[in-house]
Image (spheres, coloured by chain):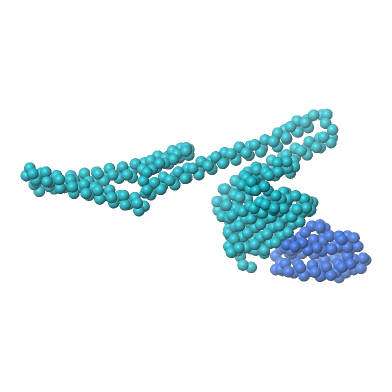
Amino acid sequence: MGNTVLDYLEKNLTVNGQTIETTKKEFLLLYTLLSSPGKIYSRTQLLDEVWGTDSESLERTVDVHINKLREKLTSSDIRIVAVRGLGYKAEKV
Amino acid sequence: MKKVILKIFLMMGSSMLFVTVFSRVALLILGKYNKATPSLSYHISLLSGFLGLCLFALLLYRFLGKKLKKISDAVKTVSEGDLNVRLNLSGHDELTELSENFNRMTQGLSANERLSREFVRNVSHEFKPPVANILGYADLLESEQISEKERQNYTKIIRDQAKRLSDLSVKLLQISRVDSDLILNLTEHFQVDEQIRKIILSMQPVWEKKNLSVNAELEKLTVSTSEQFCYLIWQNLISNAVKYTPDNGRIDIRLYRDKNLLIFEAENTARIPPENEKLIFQPFYSTDESKTEKGTGLGLPLVQKITEKLSGNIFLSCGETTLFRVSIPVLFQEC
């Protein structure tokens, strides 16, 4: 997407040709959001997708990981938008 | 039954009075003819006792028995299907109260029956146009002289009309299920804010297309009530909000707790004329007659039925914005 590439097989995030370190969860989170660009996902939905439905993790965990992702995507064409009350979406700038 | 028992005592009293008076008079008369033997006096007492009881029975019949018979006859008439029976009992006791309540009951049942018949009439009315369309366009499709474009067009129309019929039947089934599901499953608990959030998100393509601004303020709440019924309430109200809000408008969805009540609010920038406020809950009523996107017309009646079933309340305010508020008593689970 734009200047950013996600390689699902290698779990690689590349921005402008440069590889950016991501944890497995961070990668899966971004991947889920980008599976339908522009579609809003609720925190619970993201928790279910990335952490599994039986996970004990809280919605707060999603917020923390989103923030970490945002830091890593500052030079990327991809932007993660928070929609108040509903969740997050990823879209191309 | 205080008044009735009082009356019975009065009747007993009158009978006792009669017994005493009668025996006294009888003995007096016999005394004059010197026939007041102990044996005769004894028989006079028995006779007056017996006459007293007869009087009591007569009084019972006249003041209570007849009324009971009237009530019983009225109930029998209703059981035979006639709801137009009304009782007219005089007096101020519990039996009169019973007759008044009976009248209220038959009146209510008559009104219900009238509404049911009207509903069935309306439903058949709603089925006619789609069926006519399907038959009409099917006839046209049989013609060999239509273009490919026309053929595709007619087929699409038939499919749309069939979908319309399908939606209508689904809604009818939902409405009838609300009536028949006597026992609610209240043991399951669920995350109601996420339930609502999912519904809003599922409609994202629609409200994004209309450029609507959707604001969700949903308190994180876990509740015990019927998940299915709640889903139908939110789904219908939110779907209506999305459908009827004009382009570039705004929808606010709120969920919060007020003591033991779960409160859901759907406010949007669509305008309903205040005079239509009462009518809007009637089956098949629509504010926009020239709508291209026709709904089933049964969404709001369904919501109202379900809300009643859950012992809740529905409130509508029409003005600059349209606001629907549903409040349901539920059991909250503390996290």
Which chain is depicted cyan?
A: B
Question: Is residue B260 rendered to the left or right of residue B155?
Answer: left
Q: Is residue B79 left or right of residue B145?
A: left
The percent coordinates of residue B86 (x first, y second) are: 44, 40
Side (left or right) of B117 relative to A83? left
Residue B87 place in picture, x, y as percent: 42, 41
Specify whether B176 is left or right of B58. right
How far across and down, in percent of the image, does residue A35 sit? Answer: 82, 58
- The answer to which of B32 and B137 lies nearer the viewer is B32
In front: A71, or B188? A71
Give the quarter of the image for residue A38.
bottom right
Q: Is residue B233 visible?
A: no
Quadrant where the C terminus of chain B is found in the figure: bottom right
Residue lying furthest right: A17
Tell me the residue at 81%/67% (across/down).
A26
Give the answer, above or below, for where B212 lies relative to B333. above
Relative height, residue B73 to residue B6 (above, below): above
Residue B140, visible in the rendered structure: yes
Q: Residue at x 47, y 45 (%)?
A: B105
Q: Position of residue B262 (x, y in %)?
A: 61, 60
Q: For the point 60% across and 46% down, which residue is it?
A: B176
The chain drawn in blue is: A
Kindly identify the residue that appears in the image at 14 percent across and 44 percent down: B26
